[in-house]
Image (cartoon, helix red, strand yellow):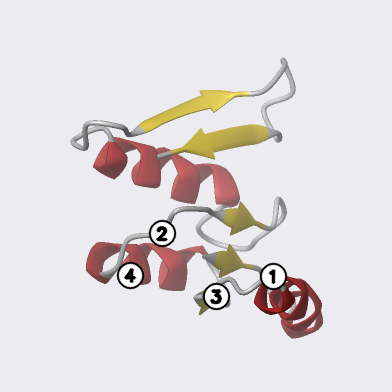
Amino acid sequence: MLVDDSAVARHKVGAILCSLKCEVIEAKDGTEALSTLEKETSDLLILDINMPCVTSLDVLTQACSAASGHAHGRCRPEGRNESHFLACR
């Protein structure tokens, strides 16, 4: 899932992912991302760090909570900078 409030960024990153034969699900903000994640699963989350309302950290935290019920769900921060996370499922 690709989440960014910039349509241009979603288009550019989405085009790269599509060229790699990835199925891309887009969301324009954190609220839309959480709503979509309630209905669909995603192997990868690409999140804009600076989003209004529901932040990328909020989305990641809720996605990790939901994934913790799965056998292979795990999330962990990379380094000490809170804005850089690696989410694995």
**Disc 3 vs disc 4: which is toward the camera?**
3
- Residue 20 percent across, percent down from the top left: 69, 70
Q: Where is residue 22 in the image (x, y as percent from the top left)?
A: 58, 71
In the rendered image, the vertical position of residue 48 relative to residue 64, given as above or below:
below
- Mark 3 or 4 closer to N-term? 3
Q: Is mark 2 on a helix, strand or loop?
A: loop
Are the residues tagged 3 and 1 within 8 Å (C-beta)? no
Residue type indicated by callout 1: Leu
Please report whichever mark, 3 or 2, sits nearer to the chain's N-terminal start.
3
Q: In the image, which is nearer the foreground, mark 1 or mark 4? A: 1
Quarter of the image for residue 72 reads top left
Per the image, the residue denoted by label 4 is 35
Distance between the Cα atoms at labels 2 and 1? 16 Å
| Res 8 → quadrant | bottom right
Which label was assigned to residue 32?
none
Q: Residue under circle 1?
A: 20
Reading the image, the residue beneath label 2 is 42
Q: Which of marks 4 and 2 is nearer the N terminus?
A: 4
The vertical placement of 18 against 4, above or below, is below
Give how far across and how far down residue 41 sits, in percent: 32, 61
Q: What element carries label 3?
A: loop
Between label 3 and label 1, give the one nearer the viewer. Answer: 1
The alpha-carbon separation of the residues under discs 3 and 2 comes to 9 Å
**Residue linked to disc 3:** 24
> Do the numbered discs 1 and 4 sit on residues whose CB atoms are within 8 Å?
no
Q: Counting residues from the N terminus, which is met first, the one under dot 1 or under dot 4?
A: 1
* Residue 35 image position (x, y, % from top left): 33, 70
Quadrant in which residue 14 is drawn: bottom right
The residue positioned 62% from the left and 33% from the top of the image is: 85
Residue at position x 36%, y 44% from top? 62
